[in-house]
Image (cartoon, helix red, strand yellow):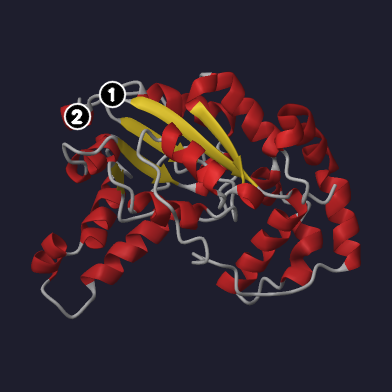
């Protein structure tokens, strides 16, 4: 299914600013990055960490119906025992949810959302949605062309974590969200799932980003070194804001389900993910952390 770029409104409030999109990877501290960036002067983030604008157009590897979740979230706001009209004006997350629902039928609502949030002091605004890692080359090309409708500079941040550790963390997080998804039970099915494996395909994502976007507009960081001063300084420079020390001891959206990886699952993960390790070592060389398992 093609998604033509329709004529979009020009949001001059965004002129000259940078849009930083972080398409993952899943379970690579993107929540921590969201809160870190939100505290930096010159950065504007949405009250909704994950907007799911682009992956709702390229749903082939979607794990959830994000439109349905957005509608459910809005219904939850409207169902609270308060004056909805007054609360809409006072609670940024409520208004952000309204914007997100509008994005379902009006593409202008994406940049309209940020034009409402950004101020004159905003240099960079952010969309941190790990599910974008699974939108494929057509999705990234659409993202590039869609963002070209505005007078902005588009930059991409992609964070990688040891492939086996990341995959197992994702399955444990799925169990945390729904106890029926017992990681030790569902892992054989998970390694056969194109939708789950799409989030483990660093080779595919990096190749797409390298091909579709200018080299200087993409930053690759590694989870294992993410919290170091050197990595955060690189991130701040990339985002065009001043560096600020971080509280690296504060966890965000941490997976609380702690289960050791079974031996048979480890062997299967190694077989599945060995090409990812090989690709990353060829593409990034010595930048790949020594802590990676393969």
Can residue 30 be seen from the camera position used here? Answer: yes
Spot occupied by residue 40 in the image (x, y as percentages of width and height): 33, 48
Which residue is the extreme one toward the bottom? 81
Disc 1, SS? loop
Spot occupied by residue 145 in the image (x, y as percentages of width and height): 41, 21
Residue at 55% of width from left, 43% of height from top?
A: 231
* 219, 106: nearer the viewer: 219
In the shown orientation, is residue 58 left or right of residue 243? right
Residue at 33% of width from left, 45% of height from top?
A: 104
Q: What residue would you read off at disc 2?
A: 11
On the image, which quarter does residue 110 sit in?
A: top left
In the shown orientation, is residue 155 left or right of residue 290? left
Q: Please determine whether, in this image, residue 180 is positioned above or below residue 246.
A: below
Q: Please determine whether, in this image, residue 130 is positioned above or below residue 256.
A: above
**Label at residue 150:** 1
Can residue 65 be seen from the camera position used here? Answer: no
Residue at 71% of width from left, 47% of height from top?
A: 197
* 279, 85: nearer the viewer: 279
Spot occupied by residue 214 in the image (x, y as percentages of width and height): 51, 19
Residue at 65% of width from left, 60% of height from top?
A: 170
Give the crowd class for mark 2: few <14, some 14-19, many >=20 residues within 10 Å. some
Contact? badges 1 and 2 (CB < 8 Å): yes
Q: Earlier in the sequence, mark 1 or mark 2?
A: 2
Q: Please determine whether, in this image, residue 285 is positioned above or below residue 104.
A: above
Disc 2, SS? loop
């Amino acid at each position: 299914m093609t998604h033509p770029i329709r004529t979009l409104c020009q949001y001059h409030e965004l002129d000259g600013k940078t849009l930083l999109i972080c398409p993952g990877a899943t379970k690579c501290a993107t929540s921590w990055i969201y809160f870190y960036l939100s505290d930096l002067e010159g950065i504007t983030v949405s009250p909704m960490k994950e907007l799911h604008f682009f992956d709702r157009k390229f749903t082939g590897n979607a794990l959830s119906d994000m439109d349905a979740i957005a509608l459910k979230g809005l219904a939850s706001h409207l169902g609270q025992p308060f004056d909805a009209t007054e609360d809409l004006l006072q609670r940024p997350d409520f208004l952000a949810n309204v914007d997100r629902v509008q994005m379902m039928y009006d593409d202008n609502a994406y940049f309209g959302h940020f034009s409402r949030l950004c101020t004159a002091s905003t240099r960079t605004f952010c969309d941190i949605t790990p599910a974008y890692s699974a939108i494929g080359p057509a999705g990234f090309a659409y993202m590039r062309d869609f963002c070209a409708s505005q007078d902005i500079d588009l930059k991409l941040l992609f964070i990688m974590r040891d492939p086996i550790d990341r995959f197992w963390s994702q399955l444990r997080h799925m169990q945390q969200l729904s106890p029926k998804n017992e990681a030790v039970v569902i892992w054989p099915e998970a390694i056969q799932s194109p939708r789950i494996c799409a989030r483990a395909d660093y080779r595919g994502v990096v190749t797409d980003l390298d091909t579709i976007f200018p080299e200087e507009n993409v930053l690759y960081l590694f989870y294992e070194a993410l919290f170091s001063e050197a990595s955060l300084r690189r991130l701040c420079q990339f985002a065009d804001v001043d560096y600020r020390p971080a509280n690296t001891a504060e966890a965000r959206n941490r997976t609380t389900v702690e289960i050791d990886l079974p031996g048979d699952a480890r062997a299967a993960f190694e077989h599945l993910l060995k090409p990812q390790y090989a690709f990353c070592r060829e593409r990034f060389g010595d930048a790949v952390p020594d802590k990676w398992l393969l």
